[in-house]
Image (cartoon, rainbow, N blue to C red):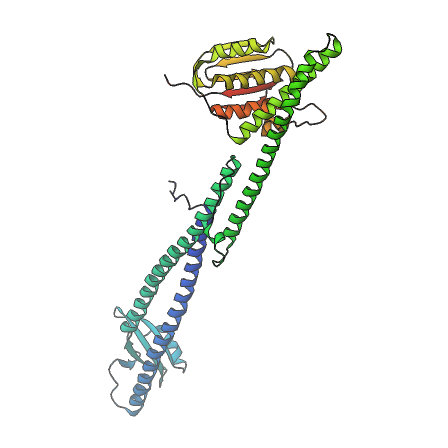
């Protein structure tokens, strides 16, 4: 049966509670033993002194021929054998034993004829006192341990809650929410003690602020560059159209078109980074939309519609995602390129060398190249960004028998 713990009661809180409990138990046991030994020694010592005192009185009365005091006698019944042997050997001693069903303190000494003179004292009251003391020590220890554990767990829980809060903010920052902050009150009030948790929270907030500032600067730079390039590129494109026909003109027009596409891609990425894209969703037949994308691409992509479905999506953005996947497959892969629709799942597969390892592990990265090979440009980066706007999930993998496989899973429209 699994023990259900509060959300804040993670391994640290559990370990702290166990440690506090063990230390409290050890301390309570040590103090209990010390008190028990001390009180027992004192109680036994007092009873022994009383027994030896009465033994001395009984010895004097025996030697004087007087009648012995009550509870005194020579070799009385119930005298422990070891104590009698000690007395017969010529020594005096005491011992606690049970006699007639109750605790008894015996004191014995030698008399003539290798016999033992002994007195007995009722030890019941002292025994009850020690037993009551042990019970009090036990319950006091239980109460003290319980109170200490509760206070300790409460104190640790405050720390663990703050740590969990810091971890939640770190996960939000990892997910892309750079506005997330811990805002620990201790970091804002210099008069309050700054513990380690506050130091971690302050460092995380500082890191997020720095990262956000750098990212915003990069976004502004990308957008500014793209906007500044747009005007001269428009003029360059118009000038290229006026050139006389020929191979050099075709090359110039091709490079100008590529540069215009790159500029538009940069602008689109800057909008995606800034979160300014807004979804205009509508119900679309996924199979028909995929066929339009393939026709518009002008490629020999094979289409397989296993099961068509109605999806709630933004048609323009979805066409952009599928168009980029198909274009990337033809540009960086090898034929045949197959686009398959199976319900809300769309896959685009080629039969080339597959995606680079970094792309499968971490997703597309802008303009990255590896091992001297060409990078994947901005097409896949834009596809991932637009897929997030659509609420879809886009993943990349390599097929076991070769080739790259991109899988897009779309939300299904409610009927």
Q: Is residue 53 visible?
A: yes
Q: Residue furthest bottom?
A: 64
Percent x, y of residue 263: 62, 23
Relative side of 7 to 328, left or right:
left
Q: Quadrant of the C terminus?
A: top left
Query: Is 33 placed left or right of 179 in the picture?
Result: left
Query: Residue 279: x percent and y percent?
Result: 46, 23
Q: Quadrant of residue 298?
A: top right
- In the rendered image of this protein, does residue 193 appear above or below residue 363? below
State whether residue 98 appears in this view. no
| Image location (x, y in percent) of residue 114 | 37, 82
Residue appearing at x 53%, y 31% in the figure:
274
Give the residue at x 29% y 89%.
61
Query: In this view of the protein, which residue sits in the foreground, 354 or 266?
Result: 266
Quarter of the image where the N terminus is located: top left
> Where does residue 378 sit, x and y in percent of width and height?
61, 24
Tell me if 271 is positioned left or right of 354 in this view.
left
Q: For the point 24% across and 88% down, which residue is it?
A: 67
Which residue is at a point 50% across and 57% down the rendered structure image? 190
- Image: 173 above or below 24: above
Q: Give the mark count.
A: 0
């Amino acid at each position: 049966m699994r023990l259900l713990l509060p959300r804040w009661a993670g391994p640290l809180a559990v370990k702290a509670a166990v440690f506090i409990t063990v230390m409290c138990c050890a301390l309570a046991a040590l103090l209990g033993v010390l008190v028990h030994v001390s009180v027992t020694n004192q109680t036994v010592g007092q009873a022994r002194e009383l027994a030896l005192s009465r033994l001395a009185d009984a010895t004097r009365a025996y030697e004087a021929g007087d009648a012995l005091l009550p509870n005194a006698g020579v070799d009385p019944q119930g005298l422990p054998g070891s104590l009698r042997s000690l007395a017969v050997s010529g020594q005096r001693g005491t011992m606690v034993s049970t006699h007639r069903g109750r605790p008894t303190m015996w004191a014995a000494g030698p008399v003539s004829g290798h016999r033992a003179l002994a007195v007995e004292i009722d030890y019941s009251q002292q025994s009850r006192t020690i037993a009551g003391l042990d019970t009090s020590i036990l319950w006091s220890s239980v109460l003290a341990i319980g109170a200490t554990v509760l206070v300790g767990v409460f104190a640790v829980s405050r720390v663990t809650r703050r740590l969990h809060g810091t971890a939640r903010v770190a996960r939000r920052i990892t997910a892309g929410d750079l506005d997330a902050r811990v805002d620990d009150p201790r970091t804002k009030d210099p008069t309050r003690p700054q513990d380690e948790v506050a130091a971690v929270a302050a460092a995380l907030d500082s890191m997020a602020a720095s990262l956000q500032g750098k990212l915003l600067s990069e976004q502004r730079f990308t957008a500014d560059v793209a906007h500044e390039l747009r005007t001269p590129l428009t003029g360059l494109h118009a000038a290229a159209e006026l050139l006389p026909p020929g191979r050099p003109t075709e090359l110039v027009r091709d490079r100008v078109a590529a540069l215009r596409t790159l500029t538009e891609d940069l602008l689109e990425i800057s909008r995606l980074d800034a979160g300014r894209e807004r979804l205009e969703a509508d119900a679309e037949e996924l199979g028909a939309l995929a066929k339009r994308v393939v026709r518009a691409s002008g490629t020999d992509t094979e289409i397989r519609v296993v099961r068509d479905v109605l999806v709630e999506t933004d048609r323009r953005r979805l066409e952009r995602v599928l168009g980029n996947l198909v274009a990337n497959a033809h540009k960086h892969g090898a034929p045949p390129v197959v686009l398959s629709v199976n319900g809300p799942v769309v896959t685009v597969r080629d039969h080339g060398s597959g995606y680079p390892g970094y792309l499968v592990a971490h997703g597309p990265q802008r303009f990255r190249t590896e091992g001297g090979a060409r990078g994947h440009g901005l097409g896949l980066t834009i596809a991932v960004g637009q897929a997030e706007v659509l609420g879809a999930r886009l993943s990349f993998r390599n097929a076991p028998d070769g080739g790259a496989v991109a899988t897009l899973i779309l939300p299904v429209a409610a009927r």
